[in-house]
Structure formats: C-alpha cells, structure tokens
Image (tube, rainbow, N blue to C red):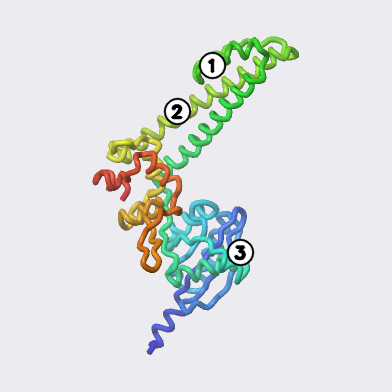
Amino acid sequence: MVEATDLAREVTDIAGGIDTHADTHTVAAIDGLGRLLGHATFPVTMTGFDDLLAWLKGHGNVIVVGMEGTGSYGATLFQHLRAQGLRIIEVDQPDRRARRKSGKSDPTDAIAAARAVLAGTATGTPKTRDGVVESVRALRVARNGAIKAHTAAINALRQTIITAPAHLRTQLTGLGAKTLVETCSRFRPGDVRDPEQAAKATLRRLARRCKMLADELAETDKDIARLLTDRAPDLLAVHGVGPDIAGQLLITAGDNPERLRSEASFAVLCGVSPLLASSGKTNRHRLNRGGDRAANSALHRGGGSSPVRSSGSARTDLG
C-alpha cells in the first residue's frame, strides 16, 4: 500500500525533458506518476536558459532532466544546467516506430525524453566537455578539415596537369606529391590570356594552397601531440597507438571517463563487442555495427586490439 507521504513525494518530484535545436529549446515536465505538467519553448540565449530553468523548477523539485543533443545543439544549455547542480541524462532520439505511432513535434520529443529518464530506459551520462580532451576534440576539427582540403587541393593540382598544355604536362608528369608542389609553387606565370600561363597561375595557386594547409596541419598536430603527452602518455606508449588514434579514443571516452563503468562498456561504445545472433539450436555471434564508428576505426588502425586491454596504465587514462 502506498503511503500518503510517498505519494506526495512522487507528485512533487518532477522529471524534465528537453528537445534541443539551433534557435530554440523545448522543455517538458512530468511528475513522479508520469503525468504531464506542461511544456514550453525558450530561445537559445543565456536569458532563455535562466527562464527555462525557472519554468522547470516552478513545477516542483527537479530530480533529473533528459536531454537530446548534449554534445551539439544542447551543449551550452547542458553546461548551464550542470552548473546549477541538475542531474542530466543523455537521451537518444525516439525510434522511428514510436514516432510513426505518436507523430513528431518538439513538445512530443521533449515529453518522450522526460518519460525515458523517469522510466529508466535512458541512462547515458553526457560528456562534461570541460577539460583537455575537449581541447583535443576542437583541434581535431581543424585537423580533419585541413586534411580534406589538402587532399582536394592535391587532386585539383593533378587534374589541372592532365588538361594542361603538352609542355607543362611533360614537365610535371611523374613527379611525387612533395616535388610537384614545390615545383608548381615556384612558377612565374605571365599574361593569363595565354592558356599555358593561366595553367601555370592555377598550378602555382593550388601548390601554395597545399603548402599553407600542410603548415597548418603540422602546427595543429604539434598542439595535439603536446596535449596528449601531458594527458595520456601511457596510452601513447602502447604499440600501434599514435596521436591520431589516442586523440580519437580519448574523445570517445570524454573528459569524464568514469561514466564508462567497465572495459565492456567501452567496447560497446566503440562497437567492438560481439552481439548475440542465436536462434533455436544455432548459437553464434555477429559483429557490432553500432557504436562510435570513429573509435571503431581507430581501434582497427591501431592494430585491431584495444589499448585498454593491452596496457593497464593506458586503461587508467581512459578511466
């Protein structure tokens, strides 16, 4: 039999759910019995964050808040609510089958997030993003962009050579990437009304772009290597693990690796845990196609074995 005091506590304790977007956040509140208390939408500003929190607390004692997109659109709001002492749970988007039944709207998603944390179906702990690992993640954004742009510039350089006048094509065909860039960067084109001189001007600009991006990449790699050496020297010492792989694994674990309760949970997060695929008398497993695919790729490129298994000290770096 439910005591009156317990029932009163269930009613006054509430759970919140937040659906995040670029310009607005929609919040919903439900009580301990799962009844909807209301929903509202607030702008993505510091004033809007304060109003959202005041609205939520106005319905009762907030015990937990489920939020979509704590690492994207909701990152700033997550930090704001976390600073106020609220417990935040990462909530995945509702599955498509559920959405087909109930429809799709911002209030619907916010209510679903609140119900998910109240029912215990959502239990993910968000990354705090307030330490060195977040710095590594930010630097890797610039690094990955520089790599893509450098590859595009090199490809454009080679494509321009294919259609260049015969004299230029003969001079440049067969050169390695580094020699090709150095050679083209020293061109001194004349009047660009001449197709050959226009080709030289294009090749010089593309080559100088390649050199600029290479310098940017080297500078970024230097910053990342310094951060990783300070944060996870033992992880870097694992055979097959360099700054690129170590950086990705640390980003996957986050600045608060204690949210990963075991080596098995880290394996699931990286998509390297086998999944049961048994039926009847057949007993087998299949590969996990989920998880963080970037971390999965890092483990594969690192030699196919997890550094948390290869080194006890590296395991400490990951939590």
Split into 4 quadrants, where in the image is the N terminus? bottom left
For this view, does 191 lie left or right of residue 181? right
> Residue 287 placed where, x, y %?
41, 53
- Is 86 in front, or is 16? 16
The residue under the point 42% across, 54% down is 288
Q: Earlier in the sequence, mark 1 or mark 3?
A: 3
Front residue (pair 304, 281): 281
Name the residue tied to disc 3: 106
Residue with the mark numbered 1:
174
- Residue 123 position within the rendered picture, expressed as x and y whole percent measured from the top left: 41, 64
- Amino acid, disc 2: Glu
Quadrant housing residue 218: top left
Nearest the camera: 23 or 300? 300
Using a 10 Å C-alpha cutoff, classify the residue at mark 1 as few (fewer than 14 neighbours), some (14 to 19) or many (20 or more): few
Total of numbered circles in the picture? Answer: 3
The residue where tag 2 is placed is: 219
Nearer-N-terminus badge (3/2): 3
Q: Residue at x 46, y 54 (%)?
A: 79
Q: Would you say the residues marked 1 and 3 are in contact, meaning their CB atoms lie under 8 Å apart? A: no
Is the C-beta separation of discs 3 and 2 under 8 Å?
no
116 with respect to 201 (left or right)? left
Q: Residue most toward the left?
A: 312
Between the C-alphas of marks 1 and 2, the distance is 29 Å
Q: Give 158 or 118, whichever is nearer the viewer.
A: 158
